[in-house]
Image (spheres, rainbow, N blue to C red):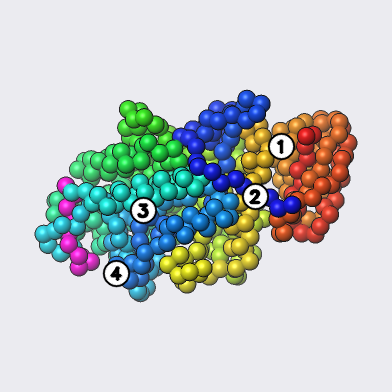
């Protein structure tokens, strides 16, 4: 029997589960009266909101085709990307062709010409089409059972490439509103994500209000402040201030939605460091941690450490592997087994997918990838979501010591979900769980479940999967 996740309209708004903060709850209850936990997982792509590409204007993205893709794979979460730039080098300084980003919050009404050759921005005029598209895409996702993290700002471009600043609306040459996002004149514009220029801060708050007004009545909304901004004390302070501002503004609205922060990245390419401790200490309801050791030896890429249950953690391959997750030469790339590992350690894993929906059924042409790994990662997210709906997830916590494999999500004495990444014989400690237990085996490779019979608790039990390769065992008393 194949395992599939359900697809129905997303309910909410989400809030952090009061007894198991690894997960959100939508406020609904299970048959036993307990608040249901909501596990989030899914593929996201860079151009799922704004059109991005190598032509100007960029080719349109097939958003509704993407929703079909997500539903087909049993996914229920995406990050809806925002790009603040109008143009930038093709992922690396000096590389051609340029990449272009269309659809921005303000009208390009001029007068005058911006550095990219188009009209300059006027910050006194909203481009209403931007907010109509935002609402339409979030609502369409919710109708398909998909929760959406709305990315409010973007920090990767400002952090990585010196020439990127030429494409930013707040470059003084690109707007008619007298806004200069680079007051120190160093050509980077990092002050845009600080609190140094009050006029910029007020523009950002106005943008937040306009976004919230557009989507506040929708149940499937989450917010994130900025993608991969520079790890800098003032930028951290700015992000925390923006989290509080979103929360404060929604207090007077019909619904309140969780606001998150994704990891900030260190000062240089050689000393990349994730700001995980700052994320956990900050005001965000959910966080997306990053590498603790830059390089392939980082624990997140091989053996994700168990969550502590302090906040909802959305473990994004974009912050842990980057494009290397698709590289044919790396052994520790993302695949289905990694997704299962992350799930059993208490995370909500999501995938930076190389899918290209500007070309039917294609992968991004400028990214190296391993086809089998990509396909298994997509499949495993749907598999783990199906099990998250099958078990009493709100009562489950990572309890690695209960299995010789080190991967066990359990409500000890009631339910156990165990992964053996390589397959073969392993043990489960049922010393504190006497009585009869039913084995259910799941093969992540084939997607099939099979009964393993009944076993006795009260001690350590040796488990032998009825198939080779990675194996999942579900022990229950039902």
Label 3 belongs to which residue? Answer: 82
**Circle 1 is placed at which residue position?**
410
* Distance between the alpha carbons at the discs numbered 3 and 4: 17 Å
Q: Which residues are magenta?
A: 115-124
State the mark number for residue 213.
Answer: none
Q: Nearer the viewer, residue 34 or 46?
A: 34
Report which residue position mark 2 lands on: 4
Sequence-wise, the earlier of marks 3 and 1 is 3
Whichever of labels 3 and 4 marks the residue nearer the N terminus, that label is 4
What element does badge 1 sit on?
A: strand
Q: Are marks 1 and 2 in contact (CB under 8 Å)?
A: no
Q: In the picture provided, is 216 more to the left or to the right than 117?
A: right
Q: Which of the 4 image quarters holds residue 437? A: top right
Which of pointers 3 and 2 lies earlier in the amino acid sequence?
2
Say whether residue 316 is visible: yes
User: What residue would you read off at disc 4?
Assistant: 56
The percent position of residue 227, horizontal first and vertical second, equals 41, 51
Nearest to viewer (mark 1 / mark 2): 2
Q: Earlier in the sequence, mark 2 or mark 4?
A: 2
Is residue 405 found inside the magenta-colored segment of the image? no
């Amino acid at each position: 029997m194949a395992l599939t996740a359900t697809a129905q309209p997303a309910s909410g708004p989400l809030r952090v589960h009061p007894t198991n903060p690894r997960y959100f709850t939508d406020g609904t209850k299970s048959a036993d009266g307990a608040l249901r936990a909501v596990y989030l997982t899914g593929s996201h792509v860079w151009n799922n909101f704004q059109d991005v590409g190598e032509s100007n204007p960029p080719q349109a993205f097939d958003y509704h085709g993407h929703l079909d893709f997500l539903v087909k794979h049993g996914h229920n979460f995406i990050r809806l990307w925002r790009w603040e730039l109008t143009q930038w080098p093709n992922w690396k300084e000096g590389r051609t062709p340029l990449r272009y980003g269309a659809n921005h919050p303000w009208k390009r009404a001029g007068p005058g010409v911006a550095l990219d050759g188009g009209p300059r921005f006027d910050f006194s005029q909203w481009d209403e089409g931007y907010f109509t598209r935002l609402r339409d895409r979030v609502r369409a996702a919710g109708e398909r059972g998909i929760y959406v993290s709305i990315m409010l700002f973007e920090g990767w471009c400002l952090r990585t490439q010196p020439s990127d600043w030429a494409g930013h609306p707040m470059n003084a040459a690109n707007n008619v509103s007298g806004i200069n996002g680079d007051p120190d004149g160093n050509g980077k514009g990092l002050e845009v994500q600080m609190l140094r220029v009050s006029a910029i801060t007020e523009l950002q708050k106005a943008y937040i209000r306009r976004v919230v007004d557009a989507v506040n009545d929708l149940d499937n909304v989450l917010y994130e402040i900025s993608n991969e901004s520079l790890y800098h004390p003032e930028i951290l302070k700015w992000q925390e201030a923006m989290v509080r501002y979103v929360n404060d503004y929604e207090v007077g609205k019909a619904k309140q939605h969780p606001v998150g922060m994704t990891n900030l990245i260190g000062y240089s390419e050689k000393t990349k460091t994730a700001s995980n401790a700052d994320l956990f200490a900050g005001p965000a309801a959910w966080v997306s941690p990053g590498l603790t050791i830059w390089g392939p030896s980082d624990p997140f890429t091989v053996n994700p450490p168990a969550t502590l249950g302090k906040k909802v953690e959305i473990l994004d391959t974009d912050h842990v592997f980057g494009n290397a997750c698709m590289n044919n030469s790396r052994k520790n790339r993302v695949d289905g087994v990694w997704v299962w590992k992350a799930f059993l350690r208490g995370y909500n894993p999501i995938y930076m997918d190389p899918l290209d929906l500007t070309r039917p059924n294609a992968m991004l042409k400028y990214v190296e990838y391993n086809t089998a790994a990509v396909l298994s990662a997509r499949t495993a997210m749907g598999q783990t979501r199906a099990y998250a709906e099958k078990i009493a997830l709100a009562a489950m916590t990572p309890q690695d010591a209960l299995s010789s494999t080190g991967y066990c999500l359990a409500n000890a004495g009631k339910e156990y979900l165990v992964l053996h990444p390589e397959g073969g014989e392993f043990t489960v400690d049922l010393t504190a769980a006497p009585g009869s237990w039913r084995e259910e085996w799941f093969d992540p490779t084939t997607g099939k479940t099979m009964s393993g019979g009944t076993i006795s608790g009260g001690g350590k039990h040796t488990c032998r999967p009825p198939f080779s390769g990675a194996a999942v065992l579900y022990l229950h008393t039902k």
